[in-house]
Amino acid sequence: MGTRRIKSVLRGFLGSYASRGSDYGGYYLFGYIVESLGVLTVDLLEPILEAGSPDAQVTSLARSKFDEQLRKSHLNRSSLSGATLTIRRGEPQDCNAYGVWLPPLQGWVVTFETSARMASGRTYSDSETVCIASQEAMVAAHERRKLSS
């Protein structure tokens, strides 16, 4: 199977999953879990389950977005012997240091790492790091901004 194809799957998955488009109830999904997040590992080849909470949505959305990228790349699941996503929260950080346009806002550096093991045994990986503030902090910052305008 082509190296470019699996690299494309991993890059596309991380780009869409870690983005602001990953939501829960219309708000950024990871803002709900970042305060309690330590390290979370998701088996991306397990079945997609119904999500009823932000924690369950993290896993469900990861699996569905990974499947979507496999379909887009015309890569069969049978060509993989494993695929995981690890989400790791780092130290508190000023989110504006990451070029995010927000009022001054404290958040955490969060790294999304994914790897896929091909049936041949070869492993590919990719990662993306973003700064994420809690949902509560984001709402409060936007309220302050509205009051000051």
Image: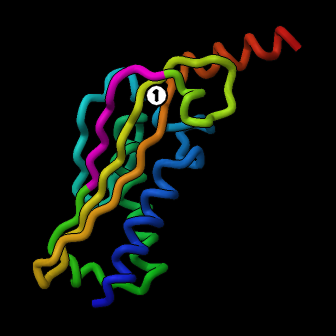
Marker count (numbered): 1
Q: Position of residue 21 (x, y in %)?
A: 59, 49
- Residue 45 seen in the figure: no
- Residue 13 seen in the figure: yes
Element under label 1? helix
The verdict on residue 78 being magenta is: no
Q: Position of residue 74 (x, y in %)?
A: 42, 86
Residue density around tag 1, few if under 14, some if 14–19, many if 20 or more, within 10 Å: many
Residue 138: image quadrant is top right
The outermost residue toward the right is 149
Amino acid type shown at disc 1: Tyr
Q: Position of residue 84 (x, y in %)?
A: 23, 58
Name the residue located 42 percent from the left edge and 35 percent from the top edge.
54
Name the residue located 47 percent from the left edge and 66 percent from the top edge.
12
Where does the C terminus fall, quadrant-wise?
top right
The outermost residue toward the left is 121
Name the residue located 19 percent from the left edge and 78 percent from the top edge.
118
Name the residue located 84 percent from the left edge and 9 percent from the top edge.
148
Q: Is residue 138 above or below residue 100?
A: above
Residue 68: image quadrant is bottom left
Residue behind mark 1 = 32
The outermost residue toward the bottom is 1
Residue 117: image quadrant is bottom left
Q: Is residue 57 above or below residue 16?
A: above
Q: Position of residue 52 (x, y in %)?
A: 41, 39
The outermost residue toward the front is 97
| Residues rendered magenta in the picture | 85-93
Residue 123 appears left or right of 57: left
Residue 6 appears left or right of 12: left
Please name the predominant secondary structure of the magenta segment in the image: strand
